[in-house]
């Protein structure tokens, strides 16, 4: 189950974020816009197959370009978000972790830092130790190991 909006002023009306509902789904983007792009591509291909012409070929190329824009827009936003999360988590870990773990923060992969952002400060040290020991490797493993979820409502 995913939440629809991440606007801070709507936080009170949303269910508390947890592992089960933390993935972001924006109906207008993932549902409506993606649907339009797919329909446009399908219709364009149908037109090209039923009556090949330069215009129908250009429609297919344009629809494929729209599909590319759709995916790249999301990928670029996520890359920027991941860089910001990496920085935020490195700063938080420098503040929260004991000295022996601070020196090893650089050993964590970006994907692990992204998952660890959901851990509250009091769980962070134990989780980082488990990640560095190889006990928790995937984002999913890390997220499932979090006992008290630290919500992130402001995401791309």
Image (cartoon, grey):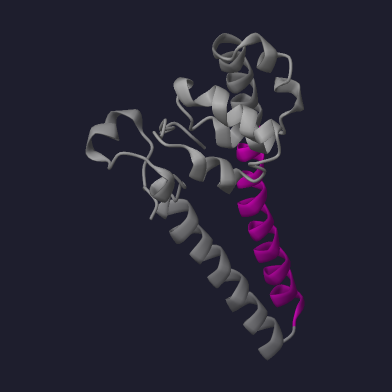
Camera-nearest residue between 25 and 146: 146
x, y percent for residue 29:
48, 52
- Can residue 7 be seen by looking at this rendering? yes
- Residue 95 image offset from top left, x and y in percent: 56, 9
The x, y position of residue 121, in whole percent, is: 47, 20
Nearer to us in this view, 141 or 7: 141
Q: Judge by depth and name the residue closer to the eye, 40 or 126.
A: 126
| Residue 23 covered by magenta stretch | no
Residue 94 point in image, percent of width and height:
62, 11
**Number of numbered discs overlaid on the protein picture:** 0
Residue 88 is drawn in which quadrant? top right
Residue positioned 66% across, 40% down in the render: 76
Specify whether residue 81 is in view. no
Q: Is residue 128 above or below residue 58?
A: above
Indicate left or right for 54 with 11 as reference.
Answer: right
Which quadrant of the figure contains the N terminus? bottom left
Q: Is residue 3 left or right of residue 89?
A: left
Q: Is the residue 109 above or below the residue 124 in the image?
A: below
From this view, report whether residue 100 is shown above or below residue 62: above
Residue occupying the point 29% across, 33% down = 11
The residue most toward the left is 13
Q: Residue furthest bottom?
A: 50
| Region in magenta | 53-80
**Above or below for 147 versus 49:** above
Give the camera-side residue of 63 and 51.
63
Q: Main secondary structure of the magenta part?
A: helix
Give the residue at x 64% y 26%. Answer: 86
In the rendered view, does 63 fall on the left or right side of 154? right
Question: Residue at the spot x=70%, y=21% of the render?
Answer: 105
């Amino acid at each position: 189950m995913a939440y629809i909006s991440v606007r801070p002023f709507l936080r009170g009306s949303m269910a508390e974020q947890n592992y089960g509902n933390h993935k972001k789904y924006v109906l207008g983007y993932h549902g409506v816009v993606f649907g339009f792009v797919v329909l446009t591509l399908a219709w364009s291909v149908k037109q090209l197959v039923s009556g090949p012409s330069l215009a129908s070929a250009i429609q297919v190329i344009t629809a494929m370009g729209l599909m590319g824009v759709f995916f790249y827009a999301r990928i670029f936003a996520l890359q920027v978000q991941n860089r910001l999360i990496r920085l935020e988590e490195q700063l938080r870990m420098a503040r929260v972790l004991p000295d022996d773990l601070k020196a090893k923060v650089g050993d964590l992969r970006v994907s692990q830092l992204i998952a660890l952002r959901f851990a509250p400060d009091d769980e962070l040290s134990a989780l980082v130790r488990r990640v560095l020991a190889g006990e928790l490797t995937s984002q999913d493993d890390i997220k499932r190991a979090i006992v008290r979820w630290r919500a992130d409502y402001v995401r791309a």
